[in-house]
Amino acid sequence: MLNETYLLWQALNKARLTIPREHPRVKSPGSSTGPCLRVRLDEQGHVAAVETVTEDEWPGLWTVMEGNHNSFPVVRIKKPLCDLSRESGIWKELGFDKEGKRKKPSDDKRVSVLADILESLHTPPEKNDKNFWLRLHKKAGELREYAYNNSPEDEALREFACRFQKASSNPNLLREISKQALQDFRSAQLEAIDTVETLLVGKGPKKDNGKTPDMAVQLAFDFSDA
């Protein structure tokens, strides 16, 4: 088998044909899309920790991309968890004036405001959100079927897919991520308070035309253990 592979490799070189090293759907998520948080899942699919993805870690990230709205396991969130009205007093607490300009309060103040928002949030996720996570749930199932060998790599893929399927079945997953992120920030394990705020309330009050400012937060799901 090794000799046959070597001969095939020589033939491809002579023909000047290059075999792609990665599957065409495997992409780098790209830091230009938006800031990224690493979400670590335990065996039950619960959020164990939320971490900032540093610049040095970006080259190691990968995701399977099928169109702009199907990325896994780096998931793109493009609307905030809380749909605040333009007149909400929360914007003032976060330092925004009536024109949408801002003077940021202290990090402690921001964390306190965001924590209060989470405590008072009781609205169920919208139908579109359910469909979004259902699609990703199915993609994780496809990954489990693909990893059918008994190699350590396939075992890891199956285990990760299983954890993600449990997590994506949780209708309050984004709340759980946000709550853990605030806890990790308070314990100095997370620095990206701007990213957590964007995930919760977006980039600022709605514009005069009623549209919410564009936002994107990437969530890179991973193991909580080795």
Image (cartoon, rainbow, N blue to C red):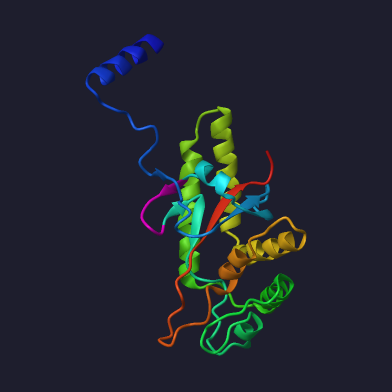
Position of residue 54 in the picture relative to residue 187 (left or right): left
Of 22 and 134, the residue lying toward us: 22
Examine the rendered structure and indicate whether residue 137 appears above or below residue 27: below
Q: Position of residue 81 (x, y in %)?
A: 56, 71
Residue 1 visible in this rendered orientation of the protein = no
- In this rendering, the answer to whether 14 lies above or below 55 is above
Q: Give the residue at the far front of this rendering.
A: 103
In the image, what residue occupies the spot 63% across and 88% down? 89
**Closer to the camera in the image, 103 or 135:** 103
Q: Is residue 64 magenta?
A: yes
Q: How many marks?
A: 0
Q: Which quarter of the rendered picture does the C terminus lie within?
A: top right
Q: Which residues are magenta?
A: 63-69
Image coordinates of residue 37 in percent, x first then y, are 59, 56
- Look at the image and tell me in which quarter the N terminus lies: top left
Using the image, determine if residue 211 lies above or below residue 59.
below
Q: Position of residue 8 (x, y in %)?
A: 30, 16
Residue 53 is inside the magenta segment: no
**Is residue 50 shown to the viewer in this render?**
yes
Q: In the image as oriented, which residue stretches furthest toward the right?
A: 187
| Residue drawn where x is 55% and y is 52% of the image | 220
Residue drawn where x is 59% and y is 64% of the image: 195
Q: Is residue 193 left or right of residue 132?
A: right
The one of 97 and 22 positioned closer to us in this rendering: 97
